[in-house]
Image: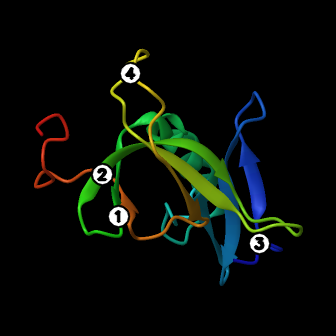
Amino acid sequence: MPRTDWTPHRRDDGELLGWIRPSGDDWVAVDVLGRICSDPTDWLDAEASLDDRGIAWLADPWVLDDETGGPLRVRILEVTPDDDAAPGRIVVKVDDFGDVNRPPTQQYVLPWPIPTRLRPPRADDPDPRVF
């Protein structure tokens, strides 16, 4: 996904929140996963959209619809957007529910921007704590 006309937008501490890109005469906010998170709007509203969204949601549980079709509850470990030298990636791991005594869990490396098989949990997803 070419980002030559995207402008990075950062928090006061320098952490990347996303980008603002042109959309006709308006601007659109794009989050760090590459998802559009505002309608076409003016620049300040696009900035506010990213500021309001923040990045805390990256720590939430996610669901990876794996190759066998079963949903896996995962946590995001890394988000690296595309750059000129290398394709981006999103690294997730099977959720261990914070169990520090558990052996390391399976990791998956996904392309950036976010693929459709990585998504927020839905109400109809199976309970990941029930085997």
Local crowd size for mark 1, using a 10 Å CA cut-off: few (<14), some (14–19), many (≥20): few
Quadrant location of residue 24?
bottom right
For the residues bearing labels 4 and 3, Cβ distance under 8 angstroms: no
**Disc 3 marks which amino acid?**
Arg
Q: Which mark is residue 66?
A: 1
- Give residue 111's position: percent from left, percent from top: 59, 67
Residue that mark 4 sits on:
98
Along the polypeptide, which appears first: circle 4 or circle 2?
Answer: 2
For this orientation, the residue located farthest to the front is 103
Q: Is 42 left or right of 73, judged from the image as shown?
A: right
Q: Is residue 21 above or below residue 75?
A: below
For the residues bearing labels 4 and 2, Cβ distance under 8 angstroms: no
**Disc 1 marks which amino acid?**
Asp
Residue that mark 2 sits on:
72
Residue name at image x 57 percent, y 50 percent: 91
For the residues bearing labels 1 and 4, Cβ distance under 8 angstroms: no
Along the polypeptide, which appears first: circle 2 or circle 3?
Answer: 3
Q: Which mark is residue 3?
A: 3
Q: CA distance from mark 1 to mark 4?
A: 22 Å
Q: CA distance from mark 2 to mark 1?
A: 7 Å
